């Protein structure tokens, strides 16, 4: 079951400058900054009610940097919270979606995550996420 939009990911060139910008826009500060080593990205998160905005700055060989080189800064992905990420990966694969990482991997903000290729989802990079239970 898909529960809600957990966050929207925005690719930025300069995380510090964008934190300052979005801080003024949202009138609130990011609640965390986190380096995701496996993806070569640095992220920050703003909590806005039930959902979040994730800003992502990429290192030189990251997919974020490649995205910005091609398309410029802007919305990079939409992340949906799902109840059972393993079941959803199986289901989507059977339906013909290109799942980019199976099994799911550990993403930012204590989540298991999996991406669906935008070419199989009308140009939208879809992230499935599920909180890692402690
Ligand atoms: Co994300």
Image (cartoon, rainbow, N blue to C red):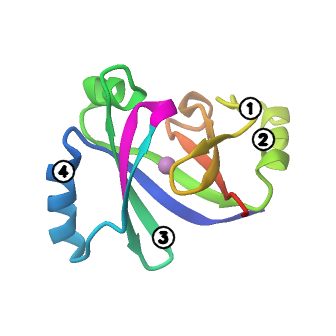
Q: Disc 3 beta carbon < 8 A from ligand 1?
A: no
Which range is magenta? Answer: 37-45
Q: Disc 4 beta carbon < 8 A from ligand 1?
A: no
Looking at the figure, which quarter contains the C terminus?
A: bottom right
Residue bearing mark 1? 102
Q: CA distance from mark 3 to mark 4?
A: 21 Å
Q: Are marks 2 and 1 in contact (CB under 8 Å)?
A: yes
Residue bearing mark 2? 89
In the structure shown, which secondary structural element does the residue marked by tag 1 occupy? loop
Looking at the figure, which quarter contains the N terminus?
A: bottom right
- Crowd class of label 2 (few under 14; some 14 to 19; many from 20; radius 10 Å): many
**Residue 94: x and y, percent?**
85, 34
In the structure shown, which secondary structural element does the residue marked by tag 2 occupy? helix
Q: How many marks?
A: 4
Q: Residue at x 44, y 80 (%)?
A: 49
Q: CA distance from mark 3 to mark 1?
A: 25 Å
Of the image marks 2 and 4, the number of the one nearer the N terminus: 4
Of the image marks 3 and 2, the number of the one nearer the N terminus: 3
In the structure shown, which secondary structural element does the residue marked by tag 4 occupy? helix
- Crowd class of label 3 (few under 14; some 14 to 19; many from 20; radius 10 Å): some
Q: What number is the disc on residue 51?
A: 3
Q: Are marks 3 and 2 in contact (CB under 8 Å)?
A: no
* Residue 74 relative to residue 132: left or right: left
Residue bearing mark 4? 16
Q: CA distance from mark 2 to mark 1?
A: 7 Å
* Residue 120 relative to residue 123: left or right: right
Of the image marks 2 and 1, the number of the one nearer the N terminus: 2
Q: In front of the other: label 2 or label 1?
A: 1
Q: In front of the other: label 3 or label 4?
A: 4
């Amino acid at each position: 079951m898909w529960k809600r939009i957990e966050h929207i990911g925005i690719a930025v060139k300069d995380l510090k400058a964008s934190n300052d910008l979005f801080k003024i826009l949202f009138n609130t500060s990011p609640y965390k900054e986190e380096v995701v080593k496996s993806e070569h990205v640095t992220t920050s998160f703003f909590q806005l009610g039930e959902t979040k905005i994730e800003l992502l700055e990429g290192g030189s060989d990251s997919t974020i940097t490649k995205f910005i080189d091609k398309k410029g800064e802007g919305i990079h992905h939409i992340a949906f919270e799902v109840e059972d990420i393993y079941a959803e990966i199986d289901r989507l694969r059977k339906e013909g979606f290109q799942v980019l990482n199976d099994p799911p991997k550990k993403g930012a903000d204590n989540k298991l995550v999996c991406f669906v290729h935008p070419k199989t989802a009308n140009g939208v990079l879809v992230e499935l996420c599920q909180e890692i239970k402690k």
